[in-house]
Image: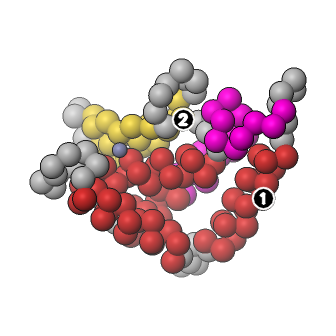
Amino acid sequence: MKKFSYRVFAWALAGFIFSLMIYRPPGRSGLPIHDRTLPAGDPEMVAPVLQHGLAKLMAEFPCGFDVELRAFDDADSDVWGWTTWDDEREIYEIHYYSLAPLVVMGETIMHEYTHVLVYDMPQQSDHDALFWVMYGSLYRFGADE
Ligand SMILES: [Zn+2]
């Protein structure tokens, strides 16, 4: 099976980010890249990229359940994403802000999948040391690939 090439992905991501940097919405200029009002591109086009990234994480760090990605575009939301557990379907749902820059969406999914992985572990709080150790493992996996 062909190994997923993070090098190719990184170049594609770099190109995408560059296009974001030079993009100017009509009537506005000079928006920083993390400004939430800056369109990140076509969510339909971005979704398969995110799905593929999640599949790679899940292959390396299995959680034992299916995980669905759900886009939301509520610009009033004060979070990039969150995770829910659907008791009926026994499935995790990762919600992400679909108008964020791609790199933010990728980080959000990595962050939320970390919550999935540590969900049943004894935690002191949502973002305790255990959470960040696990997050670091996922992050390093992404950087090493
Ligand atoms: Zn969190």
| Image location (x, y in percent) of residue 10 | 67, 67
* Closest to the observer, 137 or 30: 30
Q: For residue 86, which quarter of the picture?
A: top left
The residue depicted at 39 percent of the width and 47 percent of the height is 112
Would the CB of label 1 be found within 8 Å of ligand 1?
A: no
Alpha-carbon span between mark 1 and mark 2: 21 Å
Ligand 1: image quarter: top left
Viewer-proximal residue, 32 or 92?
Answer: 32
Above or below: residue 41 compared with residue 127: above
Relative side of 102 to 96, left or right: right
Going from N to C along the chain, the mark reached first, 1 or 2, is 1
Callout 1, which amino acid? Gly
- Which residue is at a point 28% across and 56% down the rendered structure image? 131
Q: Which mark is residue 15?
A: 1
> Mark 2, residues whose alpha carbon is within 10 Å: few (<14), some, or many (≥20)?
many
Q: Which residue is mark 2?
A: 97
Question: Is-magenta flag for residue 34?
Answer: yes
Magenta span? 29-52
Q: Residue at x 66, y 36 (%)?
A: 35
Residue 56 x/y as whole percent: 47, 64
Q: How packed is label 1: few (under 14 Cα within 10 Å), some, or many (20 or more)?
A: few
Disc 2 marks a residue whose amino acid type is: Tyr
